[in-house]
Amino acid sequence: MVAAVGRPCHQVTCGEKGETTTVVAAFNAIGTYMKPFIIMKGKRLKPEWLDGLPLDVNVTLRVFDNGWITKDLFMQ
């Protein structure tokens, strides 16, 4: 689920049951946070994965062969 604070949640889904999707979220004690970084399994980002995602929610979506985070994706 992805949503801004105080706003309704919106679900982002892709793939088949049992496939890996990784979400990297980071924040600190004073409330500073980075936008969610979502890694989905695949070769290319499919437009339908963005269906239903509100325009005011700021996320980064990437695809990778297995849906896991790697050192290179972490550095992005």
Image (cartoon, helix red, strand yellow):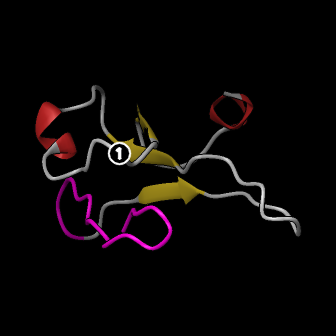
Where, by quadrant of the figure, is residue 24 drawn? bottom right
Image coordinates of residue 65 in percent, x first then y, are 40, 36
Which residue shows up at 13% across the image and 46% down it?
51
Which residue is outermost to the right? 29
Which residue shows up at 17% across the image and 61% down it?
16
State whether residue 45 is above or below residue 18.
above
Q: Is residue 12 in the magenta section? A: yes
Image coordinates of residue 76 in percent, x first then y, are 66, 27
Label 1: which residue? 56
Dot 1 surroundings within 10 Å: few (below 14), some, or many (20 or more)? Answer: few
Which residue is outermost to the front? 6
Q: Nearer the viewer, residue 75 or 58?
A: 58
Magenta span: 1-17
Where, by quadrant of the figure, is residue 56 drawn? top left
Q: Nearer the viewer, residue 51 or 56?
A: 56
Quick check: 46 left or right of 1? left
Q: Nearer the viewer, residue 12 or 56?
A: 56
Q: Amino acid at mark 1?
A: Asp
Q: Is residue 7 in the magenta section? A: yes
Quick check: 33 left or right of 73? right
Quick check: 23 left or right of 50? right
